[in-house]
Amino acid sequence: MKIQRLTARLAISTILGAFGIFNTFGQTSAFSYQGKLTDAGVPANGAYIMQFGLWNAATSGTSIGILSDLNVNVRDGVFNVQLDFGAAAISGNDLYLEVSVKKLPGDTYTTLTPRQQILSAPHAIKSGTAGSSEDSAKLGGVDAARFVQSDANGNVTLIGNLTVAGSTTYDTVNAATQFNLGGNRVLTSDGSGNLVLGSDTGTAPTPKGSSLAGPSKAQTSTGVANTFLGNLAGFNNTSGSRNTFAGQSGGFGNTTGGSNTFIGAVAGFSNTIGGYNSFFGDSAGWLNTLGSNNVFLGTWAGSNNTSGNRNTISGFNSGGGCDVFPCGFDMTGNDNSFYGYVSGLRATTGSQNSYFGMNSGLNNQSGSNNSFFGAKAGQGNTADDNSFFGSEAGLTNTSGQFNSFFGRSAGQANTTGMSNSLFGYHAGFVNTTGSFNAFFGLEAGSSNTTGQANSFFGLVAGSQNTIGNYNAFFGGSAGQNNVSGERNSFFGISAGANSLGSLNSFVGNSAGLSNTNGSNNTLIGAGSDVASGSLTNATAIGGGAVVSQSNSVVLGNNANVGIGTSAPTAKLEVVGDAKVSGAGNGVIFPDGTKQTTAATGAGTVVTSVNGLNNAVTLAAGPNVTITPAGNTLTIAAASSPAGILNQTSQQAGANFNIDGTGTANKFDATQYNSYGIRILATPPESYNLLVGFSAGSNLRFGVGDTLVGFESGLNTTDGSDNAIFGSFAGRQLTTGGGNTFLGTYTGGSVTTGGDNTLVGDNAGDGLLTGTNSTALGRNAKLGPNVSFATAIGAGALATTDNTIVIGRATDTVTIPGTLTKAAGSFRIDHPLDPYNKYLFHSFVESPDMMNVYNGNITTDANGEATVLLPGYFEALNKDVRYQLTVIGTFAQAIISEEVSGNKFKIRTDKPNVKVSWQVTGIRKDPYAEKNRIVPEVEKPASEKGKLQNPDVYGEKP
């Protein structure tokens, strides 16, 4: 065996350490030795037998002691041993260590060369027998009084200063007054809880509990519990307390302001007496002096606020003043909330504004009570009381007030238009000065510029209208191509879609599709239409009814008309009296003859009418006049001047005016009554439409209301912009506005609530004053004062704000396809306190379409058990996985037989062991195989660079 020693060194650091900093007390005679051993040129590993000899010379010399046959473990060539030759062997003279090695007991030692000199540190062993210092030279000429001594616990006390050349490490350093660097004080503290950190910090302040850090520390005198970190941070503080300033010049001007937190270079720089502020970011709240209770987050956020209070501003330069900082905008407004890059940038005196989104409310200075949500929403706004929701909604609005825009670019071009309600993508997109408009639906009214008091509801409803006023279009594409037509009312999908005229009323799906320039026309019924696009005063009533000439009324599509009967058997059947009044008026027969007087002869009834031979036989009577020569039949009460007058001009007191012979060219009335009760009215200049017995009979100042149905909106007095359809619908509504009710008794309990959408028999029952809520379905109910609550389904109930309820507690919601969500949970009444608490649990989620089955079973006396799974298990599942846990004893459990025949077997190494089992499988049914969930997918191009939930990443929506 060839053994070579590459290196060998003494490991005596513990002894040297003792000489370095402690008194030289007696040590044991043992010391450590570390060496490196190679065997045939390779680092040795394993057990070796070694011999260590102590000599007084590097070669030859006298042996001082031998330690033989030491079993030493070597790893990667390195070994460590403890050697003890006795105290007598350490004389203070030069000593050398000789190492010899062999592998097996019968082998001969191989001596490694050269011998290793033992350095002076181990000679401290001699201090164990030294009675006193032999002379001053052996202690470096240092007087004993200047020795560093330690007590029995190893503690050292220094009298005077400690200077360390090089580096040193201590677990705990306790300085009584201060720490210096380069002769300058950098850390000072006192017994009052004050801490000052930084160059030229001086002494600690008088008040208790303050911490100051940085060059030129604050001049705080009486303030307490302050923490200032950074050059000039809190420099001028006098009596302000409980402040935390971190950053260059943070809170520099603060004197008496308290409970402030300023983090960032020059954050809160000018604050003097403002309190309870939190500023985070470079220059955040820079100019704030007197403002209190503000929260500014972001570089330059709120940097121009001076005396505004209770503002919350988050985002780069949000509420900052201008693009190049600083500039002359001083913000003094209160109670604002700005979130987003440069949102509310130029705010000055405006108060109670809420801006969310990049550039939202950027130019608003003095406008108040605005709510802007979305990138660039309300960017150019300077006015008050606007609500814009959606990217670029109300982008260029300047002085327009009382507007509500909801949807991407809704009302984007509006400048001075006021009191507009625009809901939907591009709704009212180019509206500039038009006011009092209500547009609901994608691109509804998207071309309107100056048109006023229009109501467009539905996809692209009124989308081409530009300057037309006082129009009401309800239904997808209703009035789509109207440009300048005014005072039109179109109800139904595509109703009046091509109309350009004015004063038309079209009700029904596709009603009036052929009308273009015609005006003063009335079409009621699905597909009811005009034969020519330019008719006037034409009326067609009934599904598919068509009127082909002006100043005409068509009832039905080749249908029988009954008056007083529900089953007419002729084109016109009257059950009751028919009256023809006015001189010269009569009945015209198929041959064109006209009968104006009764025929002579006895009788009590009309015995015959034969227009072919001009024969009319009537009963004689005081109210019947027959003039055969003029073919005139007059039937009128002598005492009643009112009647049907054959005159070319309207007669005073007449119920009807007929211009022409037997044809009504003009029909003008303020309202229509039946049995003395109003059933149809459109009060002038109110933009209201009232249809039905007593509909809106108490309406006084409300405008833009459409009330259809028996007693619909009966008690409405001042409510505006309501659309109510159905008997008794909205019957209790008084001043609420912007509601849409559809169905019998729908919204019957609402009094002053506004902006609600209720559809279905008795939908919205229970709602009184709530706003912006929705109920869809018969008896879908809402709480009395809820906002943004939605109940969907017959009998559904929503009683909490900002909540959507689908169905009843006993209903089942089925989604045939795939449901995608960010998270899921169940909520039940808490089993321990069901009347006061809820219990939530999260869904179990997996990248696989996984089914989980589990249970407990006990093995038999042979340690075996069979688990039966559902009969469909193998038809539904693949890739089966197992998990077993034994209960109550230490035992082993295995799956002895995998699933086969919808069962599997368990075996334990002991009998009668209870085992908890779990089996999971991956769905393999046809739907699952075709619709596998893909865990990782690329975002669509339109969504790249965006976050689904930006707030969880610390970003703003």
Image (cartoon, rainbow, N blue to C red):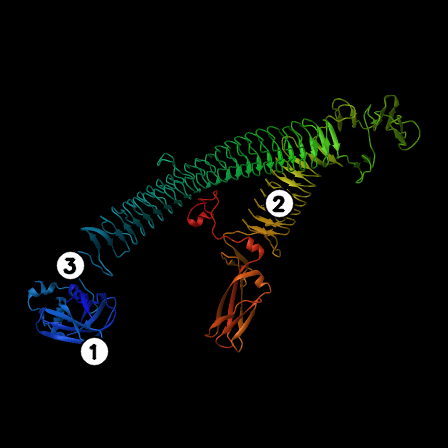
Q: Which disc is residue 410 wearing?
A: none
In this picture, residue 550 sits left or right of residue 219: right
Q: Is residue 315 above or below residue 69?
A: above
In this picture, residue 122 sits left or right of residue 232: left
Identity of the amino acid at label 2? Leu
Of the two numbered discs 1 and 3 in the rendering, the one whose residue sits closer to the viewer: 1
Locate the N terminus and report the quarter of the image it occupies: bottom left
Q: Earlier in the sequence, mark 1 or mark 3?
A: 1
Do residues under tags 1 and 3 come within 8 Å of each other at their CB atoms?
A: no
* Element type at mark 2: strand
Identity of the amino acid at label 1? Gly
Seen at 53% across and 32% down, the residue is 431
Q: Which disc is residue 160 wearing?
A: 3
- Residue bearing the label numbered 2: 758
Identity of the amino acid at label 3? Gly
- Residue bearing the label numbered 1: 106
**In front of the other: 312 or 732:** 312
